[in-house]
Image: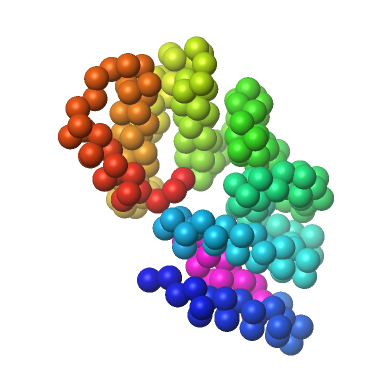
Amino acid sequence: EIDVLRFRSAKAFFIEKLALLHQEDRAVILRHLTYYSVRAASAGDSEYMEESWQLYQVGLEHDIISHRKRMTDLNFTNIVINGSRLAYFDEVDRIIGKYASHLDEELRSNAIALSKAYMYFFQKAYDRVIDELQTVHYVNVAYAIRGRSLLLRTYFEVAKTQDGYPQELHSHIEAFERYMKRNKRLSQSKRKEYLDFVSITRALTRKIEGVSVQPADLEAIRDRINGTDKL
């Protein structure tokens, strides 16, 4: 269970004592606090999005996340997603420009493209999302899942608002489902989470297209949504 008062007390104490902590201790504590706030946000407490953002800013300001001008692609992308969800687009764009050079050279272009794709998604610039994702190489499972799921979400959003990409939407639903069923590197719970996402998207797509959906099916969709972490 998420304890707001304890979390905020720990966060305030960490920031207050930051100057007294060694770099490794700073990194460990920040990682745990950030994980806690992201988990709370995923559980439906949206105010924790702002808490995560504040922690990321502390990490950047004090060179904890980007120690000695080195930053992991996961941290880079997570910061961009967090800020984009909050619609802090100017600051997100500044972070991309400032910290891109701190990424490992082999992953840099991928991390930048995927991060920009997320920023454009929350700006509802869907054509630009698709353009960026076309340049992402799925070098590992994380990029494959994030890239494929974001592309599917993008086609779905386009299909909701205008006549376009109907075949692409259906193709990506089927392709993503096949990929997740074949993937043996994910835990059963994580695979189920993404397969639920596919099922929800398929059902909502049928509704958009005017296909009759039974009340019992809609109730099942609601149950799956409630049991699925935010992507």
Q: Residue 199: percent from the left, percent from the top?
A: 31, 34
The one nearer the camera, 45 or 29, is 45
Quarter residue 56 falls in: bottom right
The one nearer the camera, 230 or 115, is 230
Q: Residue 205: percent from the left, percent from the top?
A: 37, 24
In this picture, residue 63 sits left or right of residue 126: right
- The correct choice, above or below, for 68 with respect to 161 in the image is below
The majority secondary structure of the magenta stretch comes to helix
Q: Residue 231: percent from the left, percent from the top?
A: 46, 45
Q: Quadrant of the N terminus?
A: bottom left
Q: Residue 71: percent from the left, percent from the top?
A: 70, 57
Q: Residue at x 41, y 19 (%)?
A: 171
In this picture, residue 228 sits left or right of residue 101: left
Q: Residue at x 47, y 23 (%)?
A: 160
How many marks the image carries: the answer is 0
- Colour theme: rainbow
- The correct choice, above or below, for 106 with respect to 11 in the image is above
Q: Is residue 51 visible?
A: yes
Q: Is residue 77 visible?
A: no
Determine if the magenta segment contains residue 55: no
Q: Residue at x 42, y 58 (%)?
A: 43
- The correct choice, above or below, for 7 with respect to 37 in the image is below
The one nearer the camera, 191 or 116, is 116
Q: Residue at x 24, y 25 (%)?
A: 213
Q: From this viewpoint, which residue is outermost toward the front?
A: 215
Magenta span of residues = 24-39
